[in-house]
Amino acid sequence: MIGYGIFGFELASLPRDLREDLFLSLASPGWGRRGSAAATIAARLTFENLARSFDGNEALRGVSLDIEPAETVCLLGPSGCGKTTLLRIAAGIERPDTGRVLFNHQEVVGPKTFTPPEKRGVGLMFQDFALFPHLTIIKNVMFGLKNLDSKDAERVALATLERVGLARYAEDYPHILSGGQQQRVALARAIAPRPSIILMDEPFSGLDPRLRDRIREETLAILREMRATSVIVTHQAEEAMRMGDRIAVMRDGKIVQIDTSEEIYNNPSSLFVARIFDEMNEIPCVVKNNEVDTVFGRFPANDLKEGQEAVFGARFLGLAVSKEGTGRAGQVLGRVIDRKFLGGSALLEMAVEQLDLPLKIRLKENSAPNVGDEAYVFVDTDRPLVLAKDD
Ligand code: ATP
């Protein structure tokens, strides 16, 4: 039994579907007969009030997060906000100064506990965990299967390579593979022992955009088949939205918002979060009588205080243009000063009276006006963003 020991549960206490999964993995260790990833027993992963400093620099400042079994959570945030440190603590490569990590309610690190990385049963796919160049591809995948005898390890490794479509390269060395193929071998190595928890640190960052999309979709499919609990670090909001059941947005060592992508996109808790999720025009304003007054009219100030400095956020896709004004309030006349062709869409820059900076607007290419044209700009969203100014 690989990787389950530390969870210490009774088989009979498990729900039926999980028992069947466990039976499947014990009866046919390695991979499913149909070439799909054998299911594993997903684990709950809990971070409790974690803090970690390096030479007085606080990398984590009280991070708590409860991840459901089989859930995929993406950690999203700018460089240096503590994403990798959190992952390294979960893996056991780093120790927290204070706080606890629990797998299925059992402490793996706490004030008096430390389960070493090799006993945690987690799969790792880190940027700096490159393949071993002196080992064949199958030996690379067998690396995490030390608990099995070599025949079984080989069988499991081969089946895993089959799943990621690379079995034919089993006896070759990593240098003959493309970047995407190497990434798939790294994925195979991480998942071969069927870990309950998978931790990935920017696993696709080295790939070109098209390959990245494909490998990302394949990885997601495999994670879902395995029902592994996954934490994925990324800088890219779109990647987080594509992969995460939930997204934890981090800033300066803290989680500032955690929710589904849709909820965060529609209701960002701050300007910082809104900016991470999408490009937008920021129009400064001040709260007066629970509203803000902008060139596009008045909008509710939500729970901001009277007199507070705020920002009206108009996403590039949240503005629209019309050649003829309708005479309704909320339309403002502007002139196109730049137009970038972006395939199916065009990105316009429009100079508008009363605003110092031009507005950026993304429109369908064939309906976008040309440079020099005049048009009326209006807000085209049900969810206008009014957020506190960010210092
Ligand atoms: P990136 O997206 O650039 O990888 P990150 O969000 O993953 O960044 P971390 O790598 O967790 O951020 O780093 C958080 C902070 O802790 C940074 O200021 C970093 O310099 C610091 N830090 C992390 N590890 C160490 C270390 N081993 N020694 C000293 N400082 C460290």
Image (tube, rainbow, N blue to C red):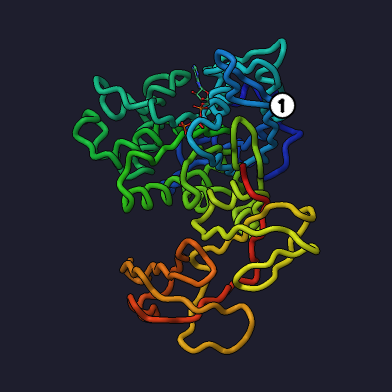
Residue at 28%, 29% (x, y): give it.
137
Quadrant of image for the N terminus: top right
> Where residue 309 sits in the image (x, y, percent)?
68, 52
How dense is the environment of label 1, judged by Cα within 10 Å: few (below 14), some, or many (20 and up)?
A: some
Snapshot quadrant of residue 173: top left
Q: Residue at x 52, y 18 (%)?
A: 93
Q: Height in image: 224 above or below 286?
A: above
Residue of label 1:
49
In the image, what residue type sits under mark 1? Asn
Question: Residue at the top extreme?
Answer: 112
Residue 354 visible at all: yes
Residue 292 occupies quadrant: bottom right
What percent of the width, then of the height, locates residue 202? 44, 37
> Relative to the observer, which residue lies in front, 334 or 303?
334
Q: Looking at the image, how many numbered discs can be counted on the residues?
A: 1
Judging from the image, what secondary structure is the residue with disc 1 in?
Answer: strand
Quick one: 226 or 289, which is closer to the camera?
Answer: 289
